[in-house]
Amino acid sequence: MDSPSAVTDDASDQHGCPEEAPFQKEGQHVRALTPEEAEKLHKDHSTVPDFKQWKLEKEAQRNWDLFYKRNSVNFFKDRHWTTREFEELKACRTQNPLCDPERCRVFQCDLTRDDLLEHVPPDSVDVATLIFVLSAIHPDKMQHVLENIYKVLKSGGCALFRDYGLYDHAMLRFKPGNKLGENFYVRQDGTRSYFFTEDHLGRLFTAAGYEQVTNEYVLRQTVNKKEGLCVPRVFLQSKFRKPHDRS
């Protein structure tokens, strides 16, 4: 399993999910790098050898399993931002008469290999969330994941996306020797992370058949007053819709 993912998974930022800072700015423009940051990225052009990359892909499920074994549920914090940012999810936090436990089904699924139709009827899902999920999946498999989800969405159903954006602080923290490819890096524990541009993400979704509703960068700052640090965070937040059946 490439990432801790299912159709409604909420896999948060591995480095602390820094949602403490208040909302700052949304827009279509990528964050401007400082001269020092630009020089650092320019110099980091070598990539991890092919054999090691193959090994990381083969051991992806194991590495994520070890991550959750180490962190359990203590890593995740309820920031309450999902219902603020995605109105489609507000009903999930209130008493919903349609939420019948006997109609709910929990299952584990590898979106890169398993067919969702084995668990979920076609054209039956109103909303699917991809929150800090797609970045953990190898770029070569992202298209398949989106097509997999597309099959179970209703006509007019939405895929809600939030993940790392290009030039996020987590990307700039990587040292030389951790680069797997363009905007794709490996952490010390073997888990991996991709950093999206809005243009690339839009192409991925539209190629899978979705219509773009919103797709923009969210810029924040995480402030650590104790250590006197203020670091830029960049996320990409988007909504894509399965087109309405016009037949």
Image: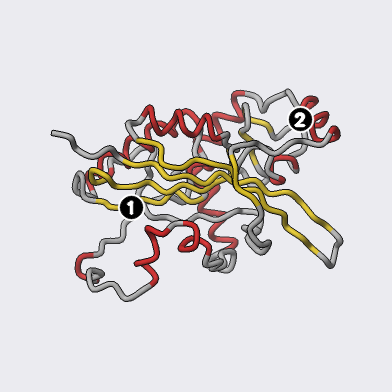
Q: Nearer the viewer, residue 213 or 163?
A: 213
Does residue 199 lie above or below 226 as drawn? above
Task: Find disc 2 in the rendering and name its residue.
Answer: 41
Q: Three-letter amino acid code at disc 2?
A: Leu
For this rendering, which residue is in front, 54 or 80?
80
Disc 1 marks which amino acid?
A: Val
Is 143 located above or below residue 4 in the figure?
above
Does the residue at mark 1 contact the one at mark 2 (Cβ under 8 Å)? no
- In this rendering, position of residue 213 left or right of residue 53: left
Q: Nearer the viewer, residue 64 or 32?
A: 32
User: Residue beneath label 1, please?
Assistant: 127
Q: Nearer the viewer, residue 244 or 113?
A: 244
Q: Earlier in the sequence, mark 1 or mark 2?
A: 2
Q: How busy is the neighbourhood of tag 2: few (under 14 within 10 Å), some, or many (20 plus)?
A: some
Which quadrant of the rendered structure holds the N terminus?
top left
Rendered location of residue 167, percent (x, y) = 69, 38
